[in-house]
Amino acid sequence: MEKLARRESLGREDLESLVKLALDEAMQRGVDQAEAAASHDTGLSATARLGDVENLEYTNDRGIGITVYNNSCKGSASTSDFSPAAVREAVAKACTFAEVTASDKYAGLADAELMCTDIKDLNLDHPWSIEAGRAIELAIDAEAAALGFDKRISNSEGATVSTNRGSRAYGNSHGFIGSFSRTSHSITCIVLAESDGVMQRDYDYTATRDPEDLRDAAGVGERAARRVINRLGARKIETTRAPVLYVPDIARGFIGHAIGAISGGAQYRRSSFLLDAIGDKIFPDFVNIQERPHLEKGMASAPYDAEGVATYDREIVTDGILQGYILSSYSARRLGLTTTANAGGAQNLVVPGGGKDKASLIREMGTGFLVEELIGQGVNGVTGDYSRGAVGQWIENGEVQFPVHEVTIAGNLRDLYPRIVAIGDDQDIRGGIRCGSLLVEEMTIAGA
């Protein structure tokens, strides 16, 4: 076990051994329950700017956390030192903290019968054995493609190629111990363009579990260039009410506000604009939101949640009606419900589309605002008030007319969600919410 503390590379079995050591030590100290999680992350990130290397970073992070429960009191401690002595010291501190914290009758492990018994291989682990020199070359290629796209592209914030592999092991005193590894890889490019003395900035990126699924670096740079050129000549518009079409990567955030509002923490704290909303009609009939935690290569896939509870497919919204919340065992107990295997968050939320892409929805919208970027954090999760700075394109007769900036789109989410009139099938799968372009019937657009 001492060798683990000095080993640069750790496997899943090593992490499981550390978890077992921590659990054994905790239970020997006489606590009621215990859980532990150990992790090891390695990664490489290379950034190039204006053809030169700007940053090269290698990461190698590790840690183990232990939580104990005794007489409904909770204590937690962690360490990045994997020596047996350090792990035992962390356990001792967790036990000491549990002696002085307040009792909480809702605290404790998830029920034993909910533990995952079949840890599925979800095809999440695809290490990229890329050398630093090659990562730098790809970053330079991405930026060069962007800078060479149009002479109006005058500057760059750089291009970055990154790769990460993380392994996690979790166990508890129910006898559950599990582990899995997952990778994430990305290529990003950010450029600036200038016209008539006015600068615009835009970006593009590709992110996947498997490096073979990444778009090519030059393609990322060219798309970043195309996006920033499309912003040149942006203007304000007069304040109006008009349809709003969110592009897919913005649409997922719009849906994400609802997910935050139905999280267990927001519900038991009574701080949600969707308070006690199970059974309520939140969206139109055609809107469904599904949780699919076992999608292969999914960016939010997991065989079990942060408490070892087996994940499963479920319907969160069906025909516009809210079916359930996003719950850990703690928040579920606070609400008198059962965990939904969402300790640590939701896994792969899917919003099915209606067979149309962004171009089709632009034509359907006729006249309105295509939102390509949002600015600021103007969303109140308690009241549902929504006010965001926005950048995009003005549409008339189903065609792009000119770029728009320095406007604000506003409304209340309880009013806006029922006014969704279409969702595209052009899903963005780079994150934990898969949603296509999303058209809202009408919103306030505050401009000049």
Image (spheres, rainbow, N blue to C red):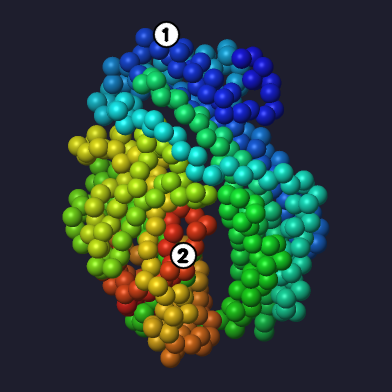
* Position of residue 47 in the picture relative to residue 343 (left or right): right
Residue located at (61% from left, 66% from top): 203
**Residue 77, image x, y percentages:** 47, 23
Horizontal relation, residue 119 to residue 260: left or right: right
The residue depicted at 58 percent of the width and 14 percent of the height is: 84
> Which sits in the foreground, 440 or 413?
440
Name the image quarter holding the N terminus. Answer: top right
Residue at image location 58% in from the left, 42% down from the top: 125
Q: Quadrant of the C terminus?
A: bottom left
- Element type where label 1 sits in the image: helix
Residue 374 against residue 304 in the figure, above or below: below
Instruction: Find disc 1 in the rendering and name its residue.
Output: 28
Task: Report the residue at 37% width, 9% height from top.
Answer: 30
The number of numbered badges drawn on the structure is 2
Image x and y of residue 421, in percent: 31, 75
Q: Determine whether 262 is above or below 27 in the image.
A: below
Residue 241 visible? The answer is: yes
Given the image, on which type of amino acid does mark 1 rest? Answer: Gln
Give left or right: position of 182 versus 351.
Answer: right
Q: State how far apart marks 2 and 1 are (Cα).
A: 50 Å
Query: Which SS class for mark 2?
Result: loop
| Mark seen at residue 427 | 2
Q: Is residue 88 above or below residue 405?
A: above
Q: Nearer the viewer, residue 212 or 147?
A: 212
In the rendered structure, which disc, 2 or 1, sits on the residue that comes first in sequence? 1
Q: Is residue 402 left or right of residue 193?
A: left
- The residue lying toward the viewer, choosing from 435 and 270, is 435
Residue 78 circle label: none
